[in-house]
């Protein structure tokens, strides 16, 4: 995670056949529990950091010199992020630096074509440790109506990881090993 700006790793949906959670169930965490959660996300394209920073500066006009960022929390209990968010009820909708729709080749990789693609946002809910994916959250897209989003610093938690244990549960090893 420390060497990538690819936020599409957070663009996942609950695995097909997974039980639907109720409002009282715990949040899903920011990380997918299994690779099956990416089964319906093949059309998700990343937005490179430089392009995303420029896009955010143009659209969200921060009052201070703030750029979107995503850093591993030094405590090891999540990620510190500056993301475009909008308040909704007791939670937040957070825009990710990825989109659904047409992609363009930039000479190295395919990236989202921001003139035609729809930005992806996920629903977050607050927990005692910060923000986590809301239990019902799948990927939503927005192409217009971005006026309620603004850049904010938030702490993203991984509910799957025990706050007192530094080890990763076996069912998440596939993800962590892929990042290392």
Image (cartoon, helix red, strand yellow):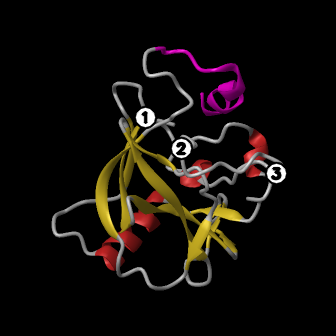
Residue behind mark 3? 16
Give the secondary structure at mark 2.
Answer: loop
Question: Which of the numbered marks, if any, corresponds to residue 27?
Answer: 2
Upstream in sequence: badge 1 or badge 3: 3
Counting from the top left corner in percent of width and height, residue 68 is at 35, 58
CA gap between label 1 and label 2 equals 14 Å
Magenta portion: prevailing SS class: helix
Upstream in sequence: badge 1 or badge 2: 2
Q: Nearer the viewer, mark 1 or mark 3?
A: 3
Q: Is residue 70 left or right of residue 46?
A: left
Residue behind mark 1? 78
Q: Which residues are magenta?
A: 165-180
CA gap between label 1 and label 3 equals 26 Å
Counting from the top left corner in percent of width and height, residue 146 is at 41, 80
Upstream in sequence: badge 2 or badge 3: 3
Residue 30 is covered by the magenta coloring:
no
């Amino acid at each position: 995670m420390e060497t990538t700006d690819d936020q599409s790793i957070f663009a996942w949906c609950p695995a097909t056949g997974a039980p639907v959670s109720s409002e009282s169930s715990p949040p899903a965490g920011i990380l997918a529990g299994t690779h099956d959660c990416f089964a319906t996300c093949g059309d998700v394209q990343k937005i490179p950091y430089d392009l995303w920073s420029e896009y955010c500066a143009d659209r969200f006009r921060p009052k201070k010199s703030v750029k979107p960022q995503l850093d591993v929390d030094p405590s090891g209990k999540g990620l510190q992020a500056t993301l475009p968010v909008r308040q909704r009820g007791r939670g937040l909708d957070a825009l990710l630096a990825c989109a659904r729709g047409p992609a363009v080749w930039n000479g190295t990789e395919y990236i989202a074509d921001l003139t035609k693609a729809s930005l992806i946002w996920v629903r977050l809910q607050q927990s005692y440790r910060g923000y986590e994916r809301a239990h019902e959250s799948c990927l939503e897209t927005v192409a217009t109506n971005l006026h309620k989003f603004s850049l904010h610093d938030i702490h993203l938690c991984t509910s799957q990881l025990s706050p007192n244990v530094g080890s990763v549960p076996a069912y998440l090893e596939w993800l962590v090993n892929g990042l290392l």
